[in-house]
């Protein structure tokens, strides 16, 4: 078996002196879907932010190796060029910047960094129209400013749409299910499933089990107090749904 | 938290691209201002008696005035006796007739600035009246324009060749009594442009002027007058840049536009004078009076400005809507970066019936810049059914800058409809990170957001100017984030 796509080794990190991750370790291979679950404040979104390169966090120990390289040494845009994609929990509005223009710039930056020719307007439009079907977005989306005035559900669908266009190698979905009604949840999950290939991996961060009715993970990790305290198959998610987090986190407290 | 701010700070630090000084011997008046200097300037220009008299009246009136202190800007007192009021490049005793006669050093300067003075501008369809210090050194395309009866020349030449026209319109829109800097300009203006579009003529090309301040301690006092006769149409471009130096340089220009019945004047400016360094040292003081008179019915005057330079900008391009159905427009992008201060906006004076005005102002503040919008919408009693729409948006980059708005509305007719919309937004670290995460660099992200913010104004600029303006804004904001 080849090297893992992503290796997180004993990661310790915090913000403003407060420790959030306490020795988190995780391995993911290409072709896999992993779910990270855990109670509020367990460090789920911190992990997502650190992987994407947000600078607010201080990393005190540990390593993140992505495709054999030190991920933490790379600037956020470099990570993006190398195929790391974060679907934001709260997608950001950028008024005045047209969605098509934004996405074309993003895609062409990535292509440039990878020595591929940039797409011209026509080629891009053809690609985009194809990809819009993945998340059932209306075409007028493209004419609107990035996320500005979008509903919560539209913003989440837009994240998955961007993911479809950028074709990441490692997609991190940070609570993409939060704030979605059941139809939107289905559309988003189906979109994610369609984007799955043997060469990419998806790290799905969620608080609730319900997303995992649609996205079937190879592994489920339970995060508590900044480290993974239990790993299992998809059935672990169902168990959590039934019993809540207490039965594991309490054990963790005792173990600690 | 501090990272985004650091990021934003770092971006601001980009040296002024056009900071160089050309070494040309100047034929200058001694520093200071008195009646003798006014006479000296007038004599140098071989002006007729009436103009000298007008200058002297302006000078005497100026002596009775006080420098305005109401703008939201701060600067040390200006010593008007320290300023050189006249300096001209020495080598051409007589103004050159063609570019071949122009001092090669001067051409080199233009080259560095990227001004298309030779064949390039013919291809681009732009006629250039280049002002270097105080004397016009190259005027092109005059013949093409002359065929249509259009006069486009320096104001000094206009005084000599077309004295009646100048006498008829000079000071009719901005009288020398108007304000402190207008009075000063009227007394000591040295050069500028004159443009006359005869009845029914549509000017076949964009007219353009580049201003440049060069000689040490020289103030520059431009005077521009544009007259569009009945049914005529003209689009005028003005762009400028100045070399880097340590002391503040005063620039007090006056621009007057007159549009007769059904005439249309479009005046676009890209201003890129030296803004001073990040501590506010050096940089141009840009105290300008620009006003257009929509004299005839159905006339239209449109101002578009992109102000990225100068240490201080104090400027309110205005429209007096005298004729019925006249239209006034003001589209502005003003950037205050480093320690720049901008107090800019417009005045729309509705006098005629059914007059309309549109104001779109986009203020960008970065670094320790302070940006103020100051605007007046005045609807006089006679202005039945006047309409105004004002949109006034501010964008902040970083947390050490400021944005301010001072809208004044004075309506004396109940049939008027006046709308005012305003927004303030900030380029946040979240937006930058979102772009970064999608593979877009911080600088590209800032440019993208700023250009998105400004696009309503940019679309009003002539095509090639819009591209230039967009680039300029990018250069001016380099280092303001990242």
Image (spheres, grey):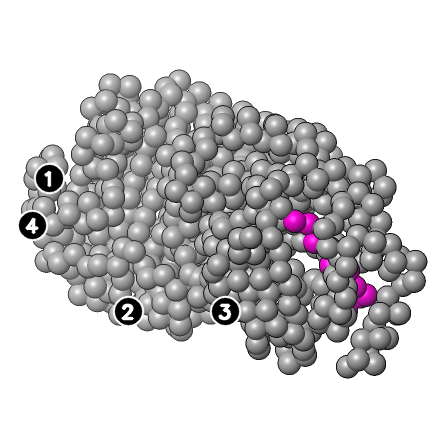
- Specify whether disc 2 shares its chain with disc 4: yes
Q: Is residue A34 magenta?
A: yes
Q: Quadrant of the N terminus of chain B?
A: bottom right
| Residue A60 on image: x %, y % | 57, 77
Residue mark closest to the camera, 1 vs 2: 2
Q: Which residue matches tag 3?
A: B6
Task: Name the chain letter of the residue that bears numbered label 2.
Answer: B
Residue mark closest to the camera, 3 vs 4: 3
Front residue of B477/B57: it is B477
Q: Which residue matches tag 4?
A: B91
Task: Name the chain letter of the residue that bears numbered label 3.
Answer: B
Q: Is residue B94 visible?
A: yes
Q: Earlier in the sequence, mark 3 or mark 2?
A: 3
Quadrant in the picture for residue B180: bottom left
Q: Which residue matches tag 2?
A: B246
- In 3D space, how far apart are the residues under numbered discs 3 and 4 (Cα atoms)? 49 Å
- Residue A63 is left or right of residue A93, and the answer is left
Q: Earlier in the sequence, mark 2 or mark 4?
A: 4
Q: Is residue B25 above or below residue B121?
A: below
Front residue of B283/B148: it is B283
What residue is shown at x 39% (from left), y 42% (from top)?
A115
Q: Which residue matches tag 1?
A: B96
In the image, farthest residue toward the right: A242
Magenta segment range? A32-41
| Residue A77 on image: x %, y % | 50, 54
What residue is shown at x 57% (from left), y 44% (from top)?
A199
Residue mark closest to the camera, 3 vs 2: 3
- Residue B21 is left or right of residue B476, and the answer is left
């Amino acid at each position: 078996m080849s090297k893992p796509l992503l290796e997180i080794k004993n990661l310790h990190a915090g913000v403003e002196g407060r420790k959030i991750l306490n020795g988190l370790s995780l391995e993911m291979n290409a072709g896999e879907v992993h779910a990270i679950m855990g109670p509020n404040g367990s460090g789920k979104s911190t992990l997502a932010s650190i992987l994407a390169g947000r600078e607010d966090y201080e990393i005190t120990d540990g390593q993140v190796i992505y495709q054999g390289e030190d991920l933490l040494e790379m600037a956020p845009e470099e990570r993006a060029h190398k195929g790391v994609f974060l679907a934001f929990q709260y997608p950001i509005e950028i008024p005045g910047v047209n969605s098509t223009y934004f996405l074309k710039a993003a895609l062409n930056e990535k292509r440039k960094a990878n020595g591929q020719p940039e797409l011209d307007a026509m080629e891009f439009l053809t690609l985009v129209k194809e990809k819009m079907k993945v998340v059932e977005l209306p075409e007028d989306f493209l004419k609107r400013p990035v996320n500005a005035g979008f509903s919560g559900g539209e913003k989440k669908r837009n994240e998955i749409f961007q993911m479809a266009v950028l074709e990441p190698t490692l997609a991190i979905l940070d609570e993409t299910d939060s704030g979605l009604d059941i139809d939107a949840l289905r559309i988003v999950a189906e979109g994610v499933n369609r984007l799955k290939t043997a060469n990419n991996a998806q790290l799905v961060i969620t608080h609730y089990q319900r997303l995992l009715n649609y996205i079937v993970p190879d592994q489920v990790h339970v995060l508590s107090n900044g480290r993974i305290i239990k790993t299992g198959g998809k059935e672990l998610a169902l168990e959590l749904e039934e019993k809540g987090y207490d039965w594991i986190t309490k054990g963790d407290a005792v173990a600690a | 938290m501090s990272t985004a701010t650091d990021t934003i700070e770092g971006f601001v630090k980009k040296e002024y691209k056009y900071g160089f000084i050309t070494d040309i011997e100047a034929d200058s008046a001694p520093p200071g201002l008195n009646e003798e200097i006014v006479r000296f300037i007038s004599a140098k220009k071989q002006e007729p008696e009436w103009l000298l008299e007008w200058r002297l009246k302006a000078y005497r009136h100026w002596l009775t005035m006080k420098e305005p202190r109401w703008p939201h800007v701060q600067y040390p007192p200006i010593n008007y006796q320290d300023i050189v009021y006249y300096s001209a490049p020495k080598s051409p005793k007589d103004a050159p007739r063609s570019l071949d006669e122009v001092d090669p050093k001067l051409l080199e300067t233009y080259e560095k600035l990227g001004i298309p003075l030779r064949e390039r501008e013919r291809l681009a369809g732009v006629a250039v009246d280049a002002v270097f210090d105080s004397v016009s050194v190259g005027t092109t395309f005059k013949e093409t324009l002359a065929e249509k009866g259009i006069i486009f020349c320096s104001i000094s030449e206009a005084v000599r060749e077309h004295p009646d026209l100048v006498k008829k319109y000079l000071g009719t829109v901005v009288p020398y009594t108007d304000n402190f800097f207008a009075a000063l300009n009227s007394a000591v203006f040295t050069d500028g442009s004159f443009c006359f579009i005869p009845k029914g003529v549509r000017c076949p090309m964009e007219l353009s002027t580049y201003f440049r301040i060069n000689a040490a301690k020289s103030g520059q006092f431009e005077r521009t007058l544009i007259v569009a006769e009945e049914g005529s149409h003209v689009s005028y471009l003005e762009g400028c840049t100045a070399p880097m130096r340590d002391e503040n340089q005063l620039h007090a220009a006056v621009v007057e536009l007159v549009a007769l019945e059904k005439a249309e004047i479009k005046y676009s400016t890209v201003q890129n004078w030296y803004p001073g360094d990040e501590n506010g040292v050096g940089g141009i003081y840009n105290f300008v009076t620009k006003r257009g008179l929509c004299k005839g019915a159905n006339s239209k005057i449109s101002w578009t400005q992109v102000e990225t330079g100068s240490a201080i900008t104090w400027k309110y391009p205005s429209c007096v809507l005298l004729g019925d159905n006249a239209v006034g427009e003001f589209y502005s992008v003003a950037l205050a970066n480093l320690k720049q201060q901008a107090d800019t906006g417009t005045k729309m004076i509705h006098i005629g019936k059914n007059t309309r005005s549109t104001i779109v102002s986009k203020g960008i503040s970065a670094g320790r810049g302070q940006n103020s919008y100051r605007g007046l919408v005045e609807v006089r009693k006679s202005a039945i059914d006047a309409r105004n729409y004002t949109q006034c948006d501010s964008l902040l980059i970083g947390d050490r800058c400021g944005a301010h708005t001072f809208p004044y509305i004075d309506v004396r007719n109940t049939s008027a409809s006046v709308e005012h919309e305003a927004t303030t937004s900030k380029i946040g670290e979240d937006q930058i990170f979102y772009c970064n995460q999608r593979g877009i660099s911080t600088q590209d992200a800032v440019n993208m957001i700023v250009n998105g913010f400004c696009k309503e104004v940019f679309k009003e600029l002539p095509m090639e100017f819009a591209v230039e303006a967009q680039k300029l804004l990018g250069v001016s904001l380099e280092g303001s984030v990242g």
